[in-house]
Image (tube, rainbow, N blue to C red):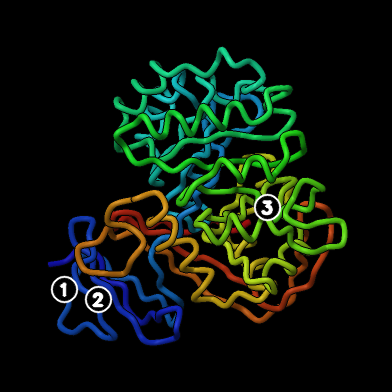
Amino acid sequence: MIDLYIKNGRTVMGNPLEVAVKNGKIFAIATKLWDIKAKKVLDVQGKYISAGWIDDHTHCYEKLSLYYDDPDEDGIRSGVTTIIDAGSTGADNIGDFYEITRVKKTNVYAMINISKTGILAQDELGDLNRIQWEPFKKAVADYPNFIVGIKARESHSVVIDNGIIPLKKAKEYQNKLKENLPVMVHVGANPPELKDVLSLMTDGDILTHAYNGKPNGMLDKNGKVKDFVFEAYNRGIKFDVGHGTDSFNFKTGEIAFKAGLTPSTISTDIYHRNRENGPVYNMATTLDKMMLLGYDLPTVIQMVTETPVHNFKLCNKGRLEVDYDADLTIFDVYNEEKNLVDSNGNQRITHTHIKPYYAIVAGQTYKVEEK
């Protein structure tokens, strides 16, 4: 007998799909499963079944005072099965964060901040004494199945007068580690300049907030993509949405879409304030915005399933295949009017609205809460 039988679903391509789950893993998958005996049956009545959504940029260490949230608010309660905290904690506090997340229903991973304090204050990289190799190395060794990346926040309010020195240290540490961890770089107000930041990044590193509307962003004063941005993209730098309170702009996204600068991953940069008050709200709303730009449903779902798994080397997730973790998102798409707002207050009307109904983690079913 299996634990869970999900019937009458469909793939993101619209084909019939049913899934059987046993011991937290996908046991069987087909257009139709026959003679199934299950402890629990979930009839999704034609809704979509995808691999569980993954948000690779959140802030959910609850003990901080600036950017914090309950991981389950950003995760299962909004249809997301796995979240990656993007550098809220450093060597000093990532162990405490790990312990807290063990009782959460959502899968939680973390990028370690290059500053040992994490984001205790906005300017965590304003003092270079907070960047220390030995505690950093020890933390990575102590939490090998939790730490999946390195985070460096490269905007003026964070680094103050230290420019790209923190990123240089992050790259130095990345190269010294035996673990193959990507560096995710937050960009914002200059200095430092985006061009200088990108020049240090290498294939597989991740530029988050890539589609912001700031003067230090990817567009020049004439609204064209800067040449060095294309160069970085073409040599393997991954572009991540990282919507956030101040880091996603419709115009930038539209120009990037037309120029072929497709994001590798869609993330929210969510924490309690921009979840409760917007403009982020949740992952589904962020997906709505990306579809409004022109990306189709299979593409945006791939950006929150297979691609973050590849970028962060998450084992057994992101695919609907036998023996993979039974992490699934059940959702539907509606043709109804919805007002969307970017980080700069610009509004767009969409008629394609994604609504998640269930987040399933290791075969356990959680109903998405109505907002």
Q: Using the image, tell me which numbered label, if any, was put on residue 37.
A: 1
Specify the amino acid type for callout 1. Answer: Lys
Q: CA distance from mark 3 to mark 2?
A: 33 Å
Which residue position holds label 2? 29
Residue type marked 2: Ile
Q: Up-down: is 118 above or below 217?
A: above
Residue 160: where, in percent of width, then height? 73, 23
Does any portion of residue 368 appear in the rendered image? yes
Q: Which comes before the other along the chain, label 1 or label 3? A: 1
Of 342 and 130, which appears nearest the observer? 130
At horizontal 54% and vertical 23% (from top left) the residue drawn is: 115
- C-alpha gap between disc 2 and disc 1: 14 Å
Separation (CA) of disc 1 from disc 3: 41 Å
Q: Residues within 10 Å of mark 1 (few under 14, many from 20)?
A: few
Q: Earlier in the sequence, mark 2 or mark 1?
A: 2
Residue 201 location, quadrant: top right
Asked if 256 appears above or below 236 in the picture, the reply is: below
Dot 3 falls on a residue whose secondary structure is loop
Please report the residue visible at 48 percent of the width from the left and 44 percent of the height from the top.
Answer: 72
Q: Is residue 244 left or right of residue 1?
A: right
| Earlier-in-chain disc, 3 versus 2 | 2
Residue corresponding to mark 3: 280
The quadrant the N terminus occupies is bottom left
Q: Residue furthest left?
A: 1
